[in-house]
Image (cartoon, coloured by chain):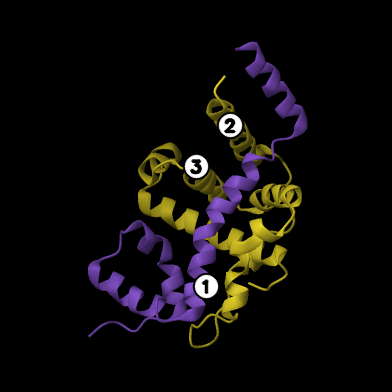
Amino acid sequence: MPSRFSTWLFRIATNAALMHRRARARRPAESLEACLPRFDGDGRHAAEPADLLAASRADELLDRKLLAEKARAGLERLPDIYRDAFVLRDLEELPTAEVADLLGIDAAAVRQRVHRARLMLRGYLGELMGVKP
Amino acid sequence: MKPRVACVDGVELLMDYLEGTLAPEEREAIESHLFGCPRCTAFIESYRQTPRILRAATAASLPEDLAESLRRFLASRR
């Protein structure tokens, strides 16, 4: 069996499981709203460049198993509509137009939802690295 | 005259910018801010890396019981 196929199958199963979490009756108490970027009164980033960059090094500096657990936990904390769009667009890497068809929304709405998910998850990764959004 | 852009505007339009759906004038205004601002440069890098990091992390994070049943399924298909 080609390893590419098994990798693909594992990813599909993981992502399908993530999307079906929405059927659960109870939602996690804490969302990722607090992980959105912050700005000062002039609309400038409140954080320093080093802190703004920290999320991009999460996979270099965090233990792989810990990051895997935290990544799944972070995805579960996304609002359903953002998670579904993120899973399809950024984890499954489907084209925006295809995600729009699957979700029954227009492409602009897909971009908006994926963008919000990325912002939240980026802040969440930064938080794992010990920095404020 | 180009519209004045702050970090918050650049962040708001970042996905549209990266997907190439902005009007040329808007794109130019965003670019002239984003690439002259060290904070936005750092922010964009982490924003762009976020999907890749999540993709890699979740690809290896299937629960063990499900992973085992998938292994059995794959083995049965050989």
Disc 3: which residue: A88
Disc 2: which residue: A7
Please name the color used to draw chain B: purple
Q: Is residue A79 left or right of residue A104?
A: right
Q: Is residue A2 left or right of residue A58?
A: left
In this orientation, does residue A33 appear? no
- Residue at (55%, 31%) from the top-left corner? A8
Q: Residue under mark 1: which chain is it in?
A: B
Residue B1 disc label: none
Q: Is residue B43 left or right of residue A102?
A: right
- The label nearer to you, 2 versus 3, is 2
Q: What element carries label 3?
A: helix
Q: Residue under mark 2: which chain is it in?
A: A
Disc 1: which residue: B42
Identity of the amino acid at label 3? Answer: Leu
Most foreground residue, A76 or A15: A15
Please name the color used to draw chain A: yellow
Identity of the amino acid at label 2? Answer: Thr
- Residue at (52%, 73%) from the top-left corner? B42
- Between discs 2 and 3, the one toward the N terminus: 2
